[in-house]
Amino acid sequence: MPTVQQNPLALVAELTHRCPLHCVYCSNPLELQSRSNELSTEVWSRVFKEAAEAGVLQADFTGGEPLARPDIVDLIRSARAAGLYVSLITSGLPLDEAKLETLVHAGLDHFQLSFQGAREETANDISGTKSHQHKLRVLQWLKRYRIGLTLNFVIHRCNIDELEEMLAIVKDSGAGCVEFASVQYYGWAFANREKLLPTRQQLDYCVERLKRAEEEQQGKTRILFVVPDYYAKYPKPCVGGWGRKLMLITPSGDALPCHAAPVIPGLKFENVKDRSLREIWEHSEAFQKFRGEDWMQEPCKSCDRRAQDFGGCRCQAMLLTGNAAATDPVCSLSPQRHKVDAILAQINEQGPAGAEPASPITVPVGKIEWLYRPNPS
Amino acid sequence: MSLDLDSKPRLAAGCRMGENNNQRVLLMPERALRLNGPSLEIVSRCDGKHSVSQIIGELQLLYSKAEPHKVEQDILGYLALLQKERALDFESGAV
Ligand code: SF4
Ligand code: SF4
């Protein structure tokens, strides 16, 4: 019997798969839903209400590019009316000054702007569009509003050396938080893995530099660093534990415990058009599957860390070992860790062999007991 | 980092109070913090009008059974933590 679940706390609303960018590590599924399959404004509004009733506190609007939805302002309004805290995770691309103003007035709580690099050339290259200058303009416009702002730099081997310039962008941005989020290797990124994984040397520099940055920005900007977990000693507590905190709704309405869950064969997803959110949360087979600890195998089953990292990421276990219930192979205790080490060895060819697994998965946060933290840290 | 007792804390941009299942929470970018008892009393006074010393004074009255110095230390610790998490801005006492 899976342990009794708590309420869901976060709803990730993938409003659309459409996006004007074409990032090489895109987290979109390899097979995209077309516009005609997207949920209507009305269905989303009902979902927000049901989410708040089920205990959800926060809605993250994402995609694709959520601004590609023509009804984005109405969606923000209805999520706020339902009582949710609304974040918009965006490339900022389809945005002008007037549109931004309507989003803020509709009640948007938190604006999360993604960057593909710090130099125009790199950023445009990675995203396959001329988008970088526009993002810098959006940052200037945002200064007029008192709204939560997070900058998200997606980092990997090709842009990690621009860290100093990224920090310069952060410095004058007024952002309350910046995330240096390493690409996670699913979907497109998994396919492009050999080109994206940073070297150990790059990573060590990054860890050291961001520690200093944390002091420099103390009280102004929180700095989070999500290390590529291939270099970590223990896995990330993916989505805060399967079916424990988070629900993701795809553009067509399927409810997923994690955005990469479709890589696990045989999982059956319920659709919000057929069932209420609470029903899905409590009974969906996909959510039950890896809830609690009953599904665990050794070494997780008897490991002291199992309540902290929940055995790591199911999707990564699937992708790398072919068994979704296996210990996440990035874990140094996993009998399959050698598969990850082999990839790292390939990438660090010149480096010393058999070096220590790299240290903490992120820069630590205080001692507050968070009710809700979707981003591994 | 020491706090200026005359400064007036207020919730930082992107942070606001919310409620769910009769439970007050502090909503912040990508996080939420459960508020109850003293933490609720403290955060609801972070409105840009109360100074740190006023907050301390009011809570010492409210929790008059507790040792006043201990109340003060707890509040200062909690405010510093919230500041570190970017949940608070401090308006300077001079204004
Ligand atoms: S911005 Fe996001 S959704 Fe769009 S291409 Fe890049 S990773 Fe994919
Ligand atoms: S063995 Fe399992 S529970 Fe233990 S640290 Fe590794 S992944 Fe986590």
Image (cartoon, coloured by chain):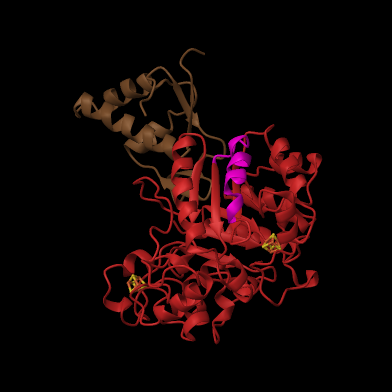
Chain colours: A red, B brown
Q: Position of residue A371 (x, y in %)?
A: 41, 53
Q: Quadrant of the C terminus of chain A?
A: bottom left
Which residues are drawn in magenta? A160-176
Q: Residue at x 57, y 80 (%)?
A: A263
Residue A297 shown left or right of residue A143 in the figure: left
Q: Quadrant of ligand 1?
A: bottom right
| Vertical arrangement, residue A319 with respect to residue B28, above or below | below
In terms of image quadrants, where is residue B45? top left
Q: Residue at x 71, y 57 (%)?
A: A66
Residue A162 falls within the magenta-colored stretch: yes
For the residue pair A204 and A91, the one nearer the viewer reads as A204
Q: Position of residue A174 (x, y in %)?
A: 60, 35
Q: Residue at x 67, y 51 (%)?
A: A78
Q: Position of residue B92 (x, y in %)?
A: 48, 19
For the residue pair A304 and B13, the one nearer the viewer reads as A304
Q: How many marks do you count on the picture?
A: 0
Q: Residue at x 78, y 47 (%)?
A: A95
Q: What is the residue that sits farthest to the front in this orientation?
A: A350
